[in-house]
Image (cartoon, rainbow, N blue to C red):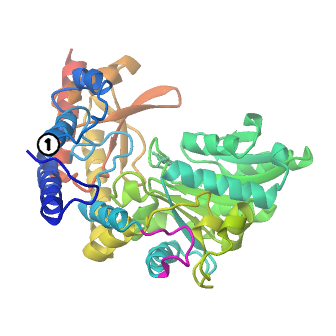
């Protein structure tokens, strides 16, 4: 029975606390690859009980408290399991979580660079690696944010500030039919009216058509509006399709419009030769959204935005205050994150990205992502050969989409049958009015064995459905 005696407990209690938490973390990591995605229990009873739990006046027992956390972990969907292939999977690297732990315990402040210049420099170094990786200019600036939605919002507010300052009511943006909902949400929060969000036609039902964007821009200019941003996708959420980025960049350049690329899902495939080739033109973007918590396998909570001209961020976000007058002298090379984002108080976020890149090395990520492309391609070919299934276009990246022969309800039935196994989770979407099943190979724990299991479960379910 251990009850903590102080906020900073004596050394032996601190050791025990760290050891017990370490045991749990070790167990979670070493069993993840084998665990089912669907735990046995959705946790309904636990949910009802937990809603009534309040902190006691006195400290609770440490073992009992950790046991409660274990109870929670035994319920619901286990996103960290290898068979998570639904939506856009995020797996969560241990090395990143450990970086977070160190950053939180040290509690260094990084909103103003003068407080902890070396900690800020560490983050800026990894952000420069990102801007270089995407071929952005010297004056580019990276930011770490909470996710892709925050990055898209930060980008569109900046674009509005540059192309329609004080005129949000005249600003227009151009997006594809498969743009992520966060892009439309960001445009609305940035002050655009929903009728100024132009959803433009696609070339093959999947790819944003640059000529449709151009027609819309010309019409808006003729109507006295302020075309503000074109948003292309480097990997749509539905199918992982990459929009024609180079041609979209041409249209943006021709009309002096901001070019934003939402690469939240697909961005880090740029580390592979195939990904880099398919994303040609991304280097011409004014801003790029990335989600290290997707294709860099980090735990949820890390998005990134890269902006080609750092002064544009300062124009949108810089604000001074009397109570900040005695902050330490800023170093020229180190921008204040608080002047280029919405945040003032900000944790040492960079360590959760810096530590895994240092400890695993860039090649480990390149190889893992190359492997995901191979596994998705293999899955697509096998499913394409099955007469009970109909595949959509060959994947640009690692999202395989298909239908079992039958109506929309049949697709839901296939999902239900596959999910009965417990070790594979898929999801569905709607493409051109039809329900389609998605299999996404992205978790760092998803191996050839996991994909083979998924494909085999899909084919068995399809045979059962079609065979009647
Ligand atoms: C293409 C794309 N953009 C943006 C987002 C939103 O990112 P987040 O969920 O990190 O806010 C997603 C999420 O799946 C996405 O797939």
- How many numbered discs? 1
144, 180: nearer the viewer? 144
Q: Is residue 381 left or right of residue 274?
A: left
The quadrant of the rendering that contains the C terminus is: top left
Q: Which of the image's four quarters has the N terminus?
A: top left
Taking depth in this image into account, of 222 and 3 the one nearest to the observer is 3
Q: Does the magenta stretch include residue 114?
A: yes
Q: Categorize mark 1 by other alpha carbons within 10 Å: few (<14), some (14-19), many (20+).
A: some
Q: Is residue 303 above or below residue 68?
A: below
Q: Please say whether residue 243 is visible from this viewpoint.
A: no
Residue 187 in the image: above or below residue 368: above
Asked whether 359 falls inside the magenta stretch, the response is no
Where residue 122 appears, x then y in whole percent?
Answer: 43, 78
The image quadrant that residue 41 belongs to is top left
Residue 226 seen: yes
For the point 78% across and 61% down, the residue is 162
Choose between 429 and 98: the one closer to the eye: 98
Question: Could you tell me residue 248's position as x and y percent?
Answer: 66, 58
Q: Is mark 1 within 8 Å of ligand 1?
A: no
Q: Mark 1 points at which residue?
A: 35
- Left/right placement of residue 229 relative to residue 298 reads right
Helix, strand, or loop for circle 1? loop
Magenta residues: mostly which secondary structure? Answer: loop
Magenta highlight range: 108-117
């Amino acid at each position: 029975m251990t009850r903590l005696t102080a906020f900073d407990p004596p050394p032996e209690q601190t050791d025990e606390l760290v050891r017990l938490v370490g045991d749990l973390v070790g167990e979670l990591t070493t069993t993840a690859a084998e665990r089912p995605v669907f735990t046995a229990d959705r946790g309904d009873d636990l949910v009802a009980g937990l809603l009534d739990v309040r902190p006691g006046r006195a400290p609770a027992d440490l073992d009992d408290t950790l046991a409660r956390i274990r109870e929670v972990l035994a319920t619901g969907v286990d996103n960290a399991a290898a068979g998570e292939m639904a939506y856009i999977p995020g797996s969560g690297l241990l090395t990143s979580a450990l970086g977070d732990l160190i950053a939180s315990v040290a509690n260094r402040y990084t909103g103003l660079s003068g407080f902890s210049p070396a900690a800020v420099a560490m983050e800026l170094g990894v952000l420069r690696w990102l801007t270089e990786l995407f071929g952005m200019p010297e004056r580019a600036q990276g930011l770490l944010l909470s996710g892709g939605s925050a990055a898209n919002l930060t980008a569109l507010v900046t674009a509005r500030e540059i192309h329609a300052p004080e005129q949000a009511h005249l600003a227009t943006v151009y997006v594809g039919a498969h743009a992520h909902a966060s892009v439309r949400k960001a445009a609305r929060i940035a002050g655009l009216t929903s009728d100024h969000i132009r959803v433009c036609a696609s070339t093959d039902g999947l790819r944003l058509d640059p000529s449709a964007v151009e027609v819309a821009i010309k019409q808006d200019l003729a109507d006295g509006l302020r075309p503000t941003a074109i948003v292309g996708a480097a990997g749509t959420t539905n199918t992982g399709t990459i929009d024609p980025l180079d041609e979209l960049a041409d249209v943006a350049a021709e009309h002096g419009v901001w070019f934003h690329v939402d690469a939240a899902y697909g961005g880090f495939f740029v580390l592979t030769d195939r990904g880099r080739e398919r994303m040609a033109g991304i280097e011409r973007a004014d801003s790029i959204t990335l989600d290290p918590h997707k294709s860099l396998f980090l735990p949820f909570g890390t998005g990134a935005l890269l902006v080609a001209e750092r002064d544009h961020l300062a124009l949108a976000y810089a604000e001074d205050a009397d109570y900040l007058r005695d902050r330490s002298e800023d170093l020229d090379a180190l921008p204040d994150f608080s002047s280029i984002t919405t945040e003032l108080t900000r944790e040492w976020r960079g360590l959760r990205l810096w530590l895994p890149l240092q400890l695993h090395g860039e090649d480990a990520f390149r190889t893992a992502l190359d492997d995901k492309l191979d596994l998705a391609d293999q899955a697509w070919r096998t499913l394409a050969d099955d007469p009970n299934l109909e595949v959509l276009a060959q994947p640009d990246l690692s999202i395989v989409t298909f239908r079992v022969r039958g109506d929309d309800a049949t697709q839901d039935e296939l999902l239900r049958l596959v999910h009965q196994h417990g070790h594979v989770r898929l999801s569905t979407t709607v493409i051109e009015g039809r329900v389609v099943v998605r299999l996404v190979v992205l978790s760092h724990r998803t191996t050839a064995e996991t994909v083979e299991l998924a494909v085999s479960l899909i084919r068995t379910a399809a045979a059962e459905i079609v065979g009647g």
